[in-house]
Amino acid sequence: MTTRITHHLNDDLLMSYAAGSLPEAFSLVVATHVSLCDECRARLAGFEAVGGAVLEAEEPAAAMAGNSLAATLRRIAAMPEDARIEAPAPAAAAGSVFPMPLRDYVGGDAGDVNWRALGGGVRQAVLPTGKDATVRLLYIPAGMAMPDHGHGGMELTLVLQGAFEDAGGRYGRGDVEVAGEELDHTPVAAPGPDCICLAATDAPLKFRGILPRLAQPFIGI
Ligand SMILES: [Zn+2]
C-alpha cells in the first residue's frame, strides 16, 4: 500500500468486533479496513489477546472431560453461521480495488458489482447481510456532492478508491469515517479517480433537503 491511512476505527468498534458482537454489515466494514490497515490489525490483536485470557480464566482445563474437544467440534459444526467476518492478512493484489474479505463477499472486484443508478452518476449496490444493519457499496463520481444528511444511528464509511472530503477532513483509500447521531455532513467526492466507498448504517439517514427525503424510500438509504 502506498497510501497512508489517517482515519482509523475506534476502540469500541474493534472490541465489539473481537467479541463477535457487531452486526454483519459493520463486521464487513471493520474486517475490510483491518485488512488494509496494519495499525488497526495490531490493536485488534491486543483486544483478541485480552478476550483469549478471559476465556482461559473462565474455563479451567482440568474441568474438561476427555471427549470434550470432539463434543465442542461437533457443536461448532452444528452452529448457525457466525455473523463475524474474518479479516485476512493484507494481500498484495496489485490493481484490485476490493481487498479481501470484501472481494469474496461481492464475488469479484468493482467491475463485477451489480450497480444500480441513483441519478447524477451515483450508483449503489446493497450487499446481502443480516437485517440488524445495512451495508452498501457507493460509487460517487469525482466532484459530486452527496446530499447533506444526519444519522439516526451509526454510519461507517470506508474508502476503497478515490477520496471524499467533509467537515471531518479528507478520506482516501483505507480511511474509515465513524459518524454518529451528532454529526451532520455533506461528503464531496474529491477530484481525481471516482470515489468508491463501503458504507454500513444501522438506522436510516436523515436528509435535510426535501428532494432527497422524497427519494429516500425508493433508494432504500
Ligand atoms: Zn486503521
Image (spheres, grey):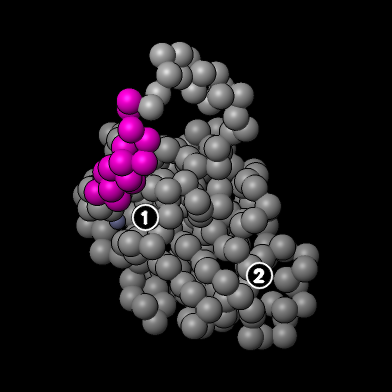
Given residues 74 and 128, the one toward you in this image is 74
Which residues fall within the magenta stretch?
45-62
* Residue 46 belongs to the span the image colors magenta: yes
197 horizontally vs 5: left or right: right
Say above or below: 200 vs 85.
below
| Place of residue 8 in the rendered image (x, y in percent of width and height, measured from the top left) | 31, 61
Asked whether residue 176 is drawn in magenta, I would say no
Mark toward the start of the polypeptide (1 vs 2): 1
Image point (41%, 77%), residue name = 166
Q: Residue furthest front?
A: 63
**In the image: residue 3, left or right of residue 21:** left
- Characterize the magenta stretch by its predominant secondary structure: helix
Q: Is residue 141 visible?
A: no
Q: Secondary structure at mark 2?
A: loop
Residue 196: x %, y % from top left: 47, 55
Nearer-the-camera pick, 29 or 51: 51
The residue under label 2 is 204
Query: Is residue 154 depicted above or below 208 in this figure?
Result: above
> Residue 14's mark?
1
Between 25 and 174, the one lying in front of the other is 25
Q: Amino acid at mark 1?
A: Leu
User: Three-letter amino acid code at disc 2?
Assistant: Pro
